[in-house]
Amino acid sequence: MSSLERSLAFFRPHHDELRKRMVRCFIALILCSIVAYYFSEQIAQFFIKPLFDASPLVYRLVYTNLPEAFIAYLKLAVLIGLIASFPYLLHQAWCFVAPGLHDHEKRLVGTVVFWSSLLFIGGGAFALFSVLPRLLVYFMSYAHPGLEPLPKLGLYLTFVARLIIAFGLAFQIPFLMVMTGKAGIVEAGYFRKKRLYFYAAIVLVAFLLSAGDLMATILLCFPLFGLYEAGIILTSIFGKKKRSPEDTPPTDKSDQDREA
């Protein structure tokens, strides 16, 4: 048997297991998306309501291409299906990697998944219930009887989804900073010294996530600045690694004899 055949024989059980897990994930995503599509109109109305509340001049949305409404509802259904099936997808991924992990690695992965998921949900909720209404009120302030807004269904839902995802990812900043501190990669002082560089990077990322919209960039930047400063504080508190016995420098024997 050649080395290539031995390698394939070694990885075949892992490949079969991975394929089984991926098939289950795909089926779960399809089923959740189908259910979400059945309620897509109600879900869309939930996201559209803040727009109607922002201005009395906006009471309907339009679509200019025949398949636009169908595609918009389809995208919304897939996004909701992904969110709904995410716990199951995460479980399948865990079942695939868990047998090869040690106990401390399993605890670390559990901590990372829990806090990152919690922060993502918090960021998305903050965007949906706090940022989006204020942002829409500002945008609709330009509307008047002589300038009628006609938002498109597909573009509006895409805007809302992009905003929620952007804030969900942005809320990972403090957690990532703390994890780099606990891993000993950087210290809190490094984030303080490079604050201006990170602020510039935050502005650039916010500009890209908001698709170049100036007001959305500003509204996204200020929470990111606050999260960055919170990350510095948390890194200084929780980011210090406990010194292990191996890290303790050995005591010079001659010094001990001299003290005696």
Image: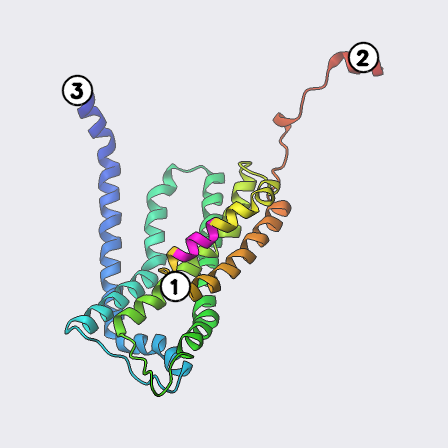
Q: Which residue is mark 2?
A: 257
Question: Please, is residue 86 above or below residue 158 in the view?
Answer: above
Residue occupying image coordinates x 56% and y 47%: 195
**Label 1 vs 2, first from the N-terminus:** 1
Q: Position of residue 247 (x, y in %)?
A: 62, 27
Magenta-drawn segment: 201-207
| Residue identified by numbered label 3 | 2
Amino acid beneath label 3: Ser
Report helix, strand or loop for mark 2: helix
Q: Earlier in the sequence, mark 2 or mark 3?
A: 3
Residue plotted at (19% across, 75% down): 64
- Residues 252 and 71: in front is 71
Residue at horizontal 62%, vertical 50%? 233
- Element type at marker 1? loop
Mark on residue 131? none
Asked whether residue 39 is in view, the answer is no
Q: For residue 203: magenta?
A: yes
| Quadrant assignment for the C terminus | top right
Q: Main secondary structure of the magenta part?
A: helix
Q: Cα distance, mark 1 to mark 3?
A: 58 Å
Q: Is residue 130 above or below residue 194?
A: below
> Would you call the spot at circle 3 few (<14 residues within 10 Å), some (14-19), or many (20 or more)?
few
The residue under label 1 is 213
Q: Quadrant for residue 257, please give it.
A: top right
Indicate the amino acid at tag 1: Asp
Q: Are marks 1 and 2 in contact (CB under 8 Å)?
A: no
For this orientation, the residue located farthest to the left is 66
